[in-house]
Amino acid sequence: MAWEKVTRDDRYLGSDKPFISVNPHHFGFNAMFVRMADLGPDKRVTIYADPDNLRLGFEFHTSKEDPASFKLGYQSASTAGEKRKGMQSTSFGLVRKYPWVKSVTKLPTRDRRFQATQEGRLWVIQLCPAFEEKRARESADIPTDARGIYRYVREGGEVVYIGRGEIRKRLTSPEREDWDFDVVEYSIVENPDLQVKWEGYWLEMYREEHKGERPFYNRVSGKSEK
C-alpha cells in the first residue's frame, strides 16, 4: 500500500511567523513574536482596540506608570530567561468589554491565532468577525439597517446557511419563509468588500470541516461567494 501524506487541519501558522493567540483569559505571544518584539519579563503591554475594524494593537514598553498596562509572563512551558519561549498577558477585562473579542475566544484553538504585523509603535492583529450577535428567528431586535455577515442555525447547532448583506431584510424575505432554522447569528460589517471577504472566509472554514460541502441552503441557492 502506498504512503499517503497526512495534511494538517489546524491551519498552523508555523514557528517562523509571529502570531498572537486570543484566549478567554490571556493573550499568547509565540516564540517568534517574542524574538521579533524583543520581549522579556521586564516588559509590559498596553492594549488598544479598533472596534470598527475588529483590530487589536499591542504596545510593549518598560514603563510602570501607565495604569492600563499589563505585565508579561512566560507561558507555563517556559522558564525565566529563555527568550525562545512564548509569553502571555491577561486578556480578561478586554474580553468582557468587547463582544467581538469574546466571540473569537469561543472558536477552536486553530482559529484563535492571528499573524501580527508592526504598524509604528503597535503590533497589530486583525480578528475575524465571529457572529457575536445571536437572535431567535422571530426576534424583532435586529436593527432594520444592520448589514454584515450572518448564518442560520438549526436547533442543535447545525449551520444551514452563511450569507452577507442586509441581515433583517434577508431574514424576512418571502423566498426564505420555508427555510428550516431557529436562530440567526451575525456580525455587523458595513464595508461591502469586507462582507464578501468574511463570508468567503467562513464558507471556506465550513468546507474544511465538512469535506468540501457547503451549508445546506448555500448548496440549494447556489449563490454563495468564495
Image: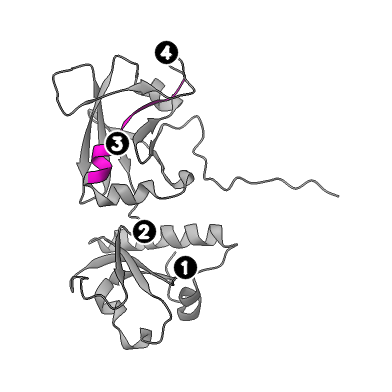
User: Which residue is identified by label 3?
Assistant: 91
Mark earlier in primary sequence (2, 1): 1
Q: Is residue 26 left or right of residue 122?
A: right
Q: Is residue 94 above or below residue 54?
A: above
Q: Earlier in the sequence, mark 3 or mark 4?
A: 4
Query: Which of the two discs, 2 and 4, labels the residue nearer the N terminus?
Result: 4
Q: Which residue is rendered at x = 13% and y = 19% of the image? A: 65
Tell me what residue is drawn at x 32 percent, y 40 percent.
125
What is the secondary structure assignment of the residue under circle 4? loop
| Tag in front: 2 or 4 | 4
- Residue 156 is tagged as 1
Going by the numbered disc 1, the residue's amino acid type is Gly
Q: Amino acid at mark 3?
A: Ser
**Which x, y percent locates residue 181?**
41, 76
Per the image, the residue denoted by label 2 is 198
Query: Taking 164 as reference, is 217 above or below it?
Result: below
C-alpha gap between disc 1 and disc 3? 30 Å
